[in-house]
Image (cartoon, rainbow, N blue to C red):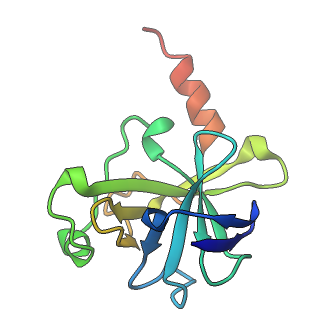
């Protein structure tokens, strides 16, 4: 399948990389078909719209910089995308990269949840008030590295 992407131009992707959001993403409700791509800079990914090349989001697994992150959403929302067990879940956070990349943040309040089996997905709101819209990724990674063993 060919997709026009924001980061890489026109590329061939495997159909298994296609992700379907029945309700779209917050603010992008009309765009439902995406592909999940590895970014050149690990540990990041791209969530690229299949419809509009300019609509693409950088993602990160929140547990990479917050080992204590736990998904806390209404069970009905998981059932909407046919998640039947925790093994079905892939969880990501949308990353915002400002002019100074050292100040990049991740939205842990609005996780992206993907069903690995069906490739259906949704964005939810965490019920845990501990998780905010802007968690400083590098700052939190450095805090983890500085903890004593």
Q: In which quarter of the image is the C terminus?
A: top left
What residue is drawn where x is 47% and y is 82%? 24
- Which image quarter: residue 41? top right
What is the residue that sits farthest to the right in this orientation?
99
What residue is drawn where x is 39% and y is 54%? 91
107 or 42: which is nearer to us?
A: 42
* 117 left or right of 122 in image: left
* 5 left or right of 17 in image: right
* 30 left or right of 20 in image: right
Q: Can residue 73 be seen in this view?
A: yes
19 or 96: which is nearer to us?
A: 19
Using the image, determine if residue 55 lies above or below residue 102.
below
What residue is drawn where x is 76% and y is 40%? 102
What is the residue that sits farthest to the top in this orientation?
149
What is the residue that sits farthest to the left in this orientation?
84
Number of on-image labels: 0
Query: Can you give x and y, in whole percent of width and height, for residue 67 in the image?
Result: 40, 34
Q: Can residue 135 be seen in this view?
A: no
Using the image, determine if residue 1 lies above or below residue 86.
below
What is the residue that sits farthest to the bottom in this orientation?
30
* 20 left or right of 52 in image: left
Q: Quadrant of the N terminus?
A: bottom right
146 or 7: which is nearer to us?
A: 7
Query: Can you give x and y, in whole percent of width and height, for residue 60 in the image?
Result: 54, 49
Query: Can you give x and y, in whole percent of width and height, for residue 27 in the image?
Result: 57, 83
Using the image, determine if residue 101 lies above or below residue 37.
above
19 or 73: which is nearer to us?
A: 19
Query: Can you give x and y, in whole percent of width and height, for residue 80 in the image?
Result: 24, 78
């Amino acid at each position: 399948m060919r997709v026009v992407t924001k980061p890489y131009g026109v590329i061939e992707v495997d159909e298994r990389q296609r992700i379907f959001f029945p309700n779209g993403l917050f603010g992008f409700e009309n765009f439902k078909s995406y592909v999940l791509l590895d970014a050149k800079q690990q540990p990041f990914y791209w969530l690229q719209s299949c419809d509009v090349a300019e609509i693409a989001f950088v993602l990160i697994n929140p547990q990479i910089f917050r080992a204590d992150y736990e998904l806390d959403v209404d069970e009905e929302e998981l059932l909407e995308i046919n998640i039947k067990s925790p093994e079905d879940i892939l969880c990501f956070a949308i990353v915002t990269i400002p002019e100074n990349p050292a100040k990049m943040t991740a939205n842990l309040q609005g996780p992206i949840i993907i069903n690995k089996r069906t490739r259906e997905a949704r964005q939810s709101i965490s019920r845990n008030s501990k998780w905010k819209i802007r968690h400083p990724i590098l700052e939190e990674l450095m805090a983890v590295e500085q903890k004593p063993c």
